[in-house]
Image (cartoon, grey):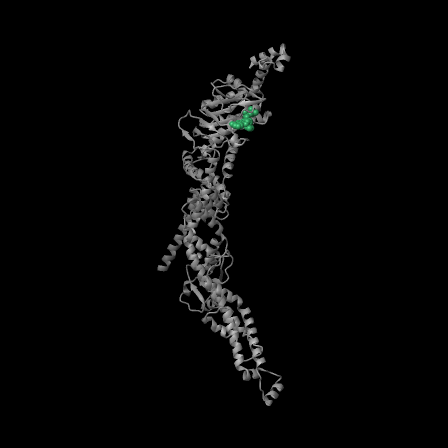
């Protein structure tokens, strides 16, 4: 009864367990982009939820078949899920491009691939909690000092690897149960699994393997020669049965671990494990996972390898000894003996045993001592060495092949036993470090993420922006300098620009209108990622979406024009809390129609309470066509110098900037009026044309 009850409750637990794991998988598949297969891979981590919540890309990437890139995408999806972000903030191609550019600026400041991927979990969002979460992280990161020593040490750090362990030949698992057999093969692929029926089979195995681990309880108490252990729960503790796994892990990750320690030291960070303990443990394991620094193991290994060579040299030494002895001796031999010797075919054995027995014994002693000395054998092993030379006297002296082979077998077994014991002992020490080293490396890698943010903030003189409440708030940028411009950052003129509501931005050619839109886009993207922005001060409303339309390449044909118009029609619906940036929409069609269309779109956006900046050369016309009061700002040329426009890069509020043609006409009018004092054009142009430039200027 008891057994039946036990079995029943066991199978219930099994069912419950399956239920629990599929529940957990279901939760994971709730995340966008996580299918059944990915969920299964992630479930293998055990703590996938936590890794997802903390955006721990390194841990996620340890799931089978999940690359770092995929891990970053999953972590990003999980963050979106947690903050209810539907991924619609970046609403247009140009907006997405600006985000990619911002990300690239950050990623180029990382030292590890991990940090580059981890930065991809940062994205612009309308979620206040998410922005705040990253801002806190960024604020801490900006305090970090990007010390070159730390950056150098980071070069050697990468996420921990799980090196596979090859076949371990000196140990095997044994079971009489077919199910356990299948389970063992899966759980511990490093060892061969043998089927046994009785004690005799186990004894047989013990002759071929240094250690036999029997998995069935019924063999408990079995008494056979050799190292046989009955460990029914061995499959639950594979690390103990195959300590090679842990050793391979530490050996394979040695450089990363040492680099992670260096990072901590250079950065003055508290490491997650005792550096001395880790360094010591690493110095005890060789690259191939063997234990180093044990003299006894070294002795046994060398002895096992050298048995044959030692036997050969011992043979030579014995024969040299015997030869010398014979050479120096006068052997007296009676005539009958001599006769019988000749008749027997000149056998010297009897002569050796009778006349040279002392010398022969000495030769054997020389040989045995040679074996013991060269192999550095211990007294308990010397007994076996004794037998390698002995028996009936012969010349030349020959080793006892069987005894030599026995000695070798014993030494190999002793070596393997010692190696296994040392591995288990070292593995037990390493086990305590296994979890902490994960943290050690993760902390170093996370530092790289923080340092990338710190370097970005320092390189581009960034500040954390302030978010404003209130529906009429737009954005204010003071001293903004875009790192995306085609000039060196040192040469970028700071731009002040503030917009709330709907605005047209006018200005001279190449005055910096597009660059201003890029700056606004970049500042808003970074701000809503929770990151610092390249400006002296920035205030902004938390926008729901960013719609940025780049300048189109020339006039569109009817079909493309219709599609673009549909795009903009969609823009006039939905949430009002958006930022809309549009660059020279007029280039899509003829100027007259463009002005009307832009005016219409602006009216709609104004009605929604959106924040918008439309760059246009038709600002005057649009304002006239619009039914609402549209603000016009202008990037002003302060003059022409040596044929080059001198520009004030900060748009002037409520000011329709003079266009480039207007400036040139003004220049010609000024010159032909003779204000240049003896200018060539003034003198030559004389009559008619003076009036023409003035009259032309009057039309602007
Ligand atoms: N703030 C700035 N500091 C330094 N250089 C700038 C700045 N803004 C723009 N420039 C320079 O001026 C060039 C032209 O800028 P941009 O393309 O933004 O002008 P634009 O007004 O949009 O011109 P267009 O009317 O021809 O479209 C840039 O390529 C850059 O070299």
Residue 104 visible from this viewpoint: yes
Q: Residue at x 53, y 77 (%)?
A: 363
Q: Name, please, the residue furthest toward the bottom.
A: 336
Please indicate whether residue 693 sits to the left or right of residue 608 in the image. right
Judge by depth and name the residue closer to the eye, 321 or 31: 321
Above or below, 303 relative to 483:
below
Q: How many numbered callouts?
A: 0
Q: Farthest residue to the top: give it.
A: 687
Q: Quarter of the image containing the C terminus?
A: top right
Image quadrant occupied by the N terminus: bottom left
Q: Residue lying furthest right in this view?
A: 684
Residue 561's place in the image compared with 82, above or below, is above
Foreground of the two, 150 or 253: 150
Q: Quadrant of ligand 1?
A: top right
Q: Horizontal and vertical percent for residue 222? A: 42, 67
Residue 658: percent from left, percent from top: 54, 18
Say if 670 sits above or below 405 in the image. Answer: above
Q: Quadrant of residue 317?
A: bottom right
Measuring from the top left, give residue 45's x and y in whole percent.
45, 48
Position of residue 358 relative to residue 11, above or below, is below
């Amino acid at each position: 009864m008891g057994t039946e009850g036990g079995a029943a409750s066991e199978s219930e637990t099994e069912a419950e367990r399956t239920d629990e794991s599929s529940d957990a998988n279901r939760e994971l598949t709730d995340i966008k982009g996580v299918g059944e297969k990915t969920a299964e891979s992630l479930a293998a981590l055990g703590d996938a939820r936590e890794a997802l919540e903390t955006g721990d890309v390194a841990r996620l990437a340890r799931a089978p078949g999940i690359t770092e890139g995929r891990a970053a995408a999953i972590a990003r999806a999980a963050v979106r899920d947690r903050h209810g972000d539907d991924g619609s903030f970046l609403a247009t191609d140009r907006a997405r491009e600006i985000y990619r550019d911002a990300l690239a600026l950050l990623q180029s400041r990382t030292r590890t691939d991990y940090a580059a991927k981890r930065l991809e979990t940062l994205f612009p969002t309308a979620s206040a909690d998410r922005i705040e979460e990253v801002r806190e992280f960024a604020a801490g990161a900006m305090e970090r000092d990007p010390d070159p020593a730390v950056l150098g040490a980071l070069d050697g750090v990468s996420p921990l690897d799980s090196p596979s362990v090859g076949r371990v030949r000196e140990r095997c698992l044994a079971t009489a149960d077919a199910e356990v057999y299948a389970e063992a093969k899966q759980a511990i692929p490093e060892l061969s699994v043998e089927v046994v029926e009785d004690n005799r089979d186990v004894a047989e195995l013990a002759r071929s393997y240094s250690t036999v681990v029997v998995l069935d309880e019924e063999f408990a108490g079995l008494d056979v020669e050799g190292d046989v252990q009955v460990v029914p729960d061995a499959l639950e503790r594979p690390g103990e049965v195959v300590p090679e796994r842990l050793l391979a892990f530490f050996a394979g990750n040695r450089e990363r671990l040492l680099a992670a320690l260096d990072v901590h030291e250079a950065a003055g960070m508290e490491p997650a494990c005792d550096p001395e303990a880790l360094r010591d443990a690493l110095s005890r394991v060789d690259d191939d996972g063997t234990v180093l620094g044990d003299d006894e193991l070294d002795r046994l290994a060398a002895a096992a390898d050298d048995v044959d060579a030692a036997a050969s040299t011992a043979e030579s030494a014995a024969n040299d000894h015997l030869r010398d002895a014979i050479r120096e001796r006068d052997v007296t031999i009676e005539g009958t003996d001599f006769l019988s010797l000749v008749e027997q075919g000149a056998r010297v054995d009897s002569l050796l045993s009778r006349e040279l027995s002392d010398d022969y014994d000495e030769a054997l002693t020389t040989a045995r001592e040679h074996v013991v000395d060269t192999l550095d054998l211990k007294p308990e092993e010397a007994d076996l060495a004794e037998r390698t030379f002995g028996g009936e006297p012969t010349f030349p002296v020959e080793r006892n092949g069987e005894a030599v082979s026995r000695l070798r077998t014993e030494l190999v077994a002793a070596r393997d036993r010692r190696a296994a014991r040392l591995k288990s002992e070292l593995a037990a020490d390493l086990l305590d470090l296994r979890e902490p080293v994960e943290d050690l490396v993760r902390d170093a890698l996370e530092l790289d993420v923080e340092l990338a943010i710190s370097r970005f903030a320092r390189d581009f003189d960034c500040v954390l922006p302030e978010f404003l409440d209130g529906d009429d708030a737009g954005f204010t940028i003071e001293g903004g300098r875009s790192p995306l411009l085609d000039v060196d950052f040192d040469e970028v003129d700071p731009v002040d620009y503030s917009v709330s509501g709907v605005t047209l931005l006018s200005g001279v050619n190449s005055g910096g209108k597009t660059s201003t839109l890029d700056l606004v886009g970049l500042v808003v993207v970074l701000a809503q990622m929770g990151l610092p922005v390249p400006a002296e001060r920035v205030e902004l409303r938390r926008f729901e979406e960013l719609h940025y339309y780049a300048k189109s390449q020339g006039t569109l044909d009817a079909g493309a024009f219709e599609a673009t118009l549909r795009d903009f029609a969609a823009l006039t619906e939905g949430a009002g809390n958006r930022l809309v940036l549009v660059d020279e929409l007029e280039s899509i069609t003829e100027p007259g129609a463009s002005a009307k269309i832009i005016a219409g779109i602006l009216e709609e956006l104004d009605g929604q309470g959106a924040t918008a900046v439309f760059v246009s050369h038709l600002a005057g016309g649009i304002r006239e066509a619009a039914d609402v009061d549209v603000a016009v700002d202008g990037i002003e040329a302060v003059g022409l110098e040596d044929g080059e426009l001198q520009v004030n890069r900060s748009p002037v509020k409520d000011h329709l900037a003079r266009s480039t043609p207007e400036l040139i006409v003004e220049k010609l009018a000024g010159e032909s009026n003779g204000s240049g004092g003896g200018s060539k054009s003034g003198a030559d142009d004389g009559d008619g044309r003076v009036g023409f430039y003035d009259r032309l200027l009057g039309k602007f």
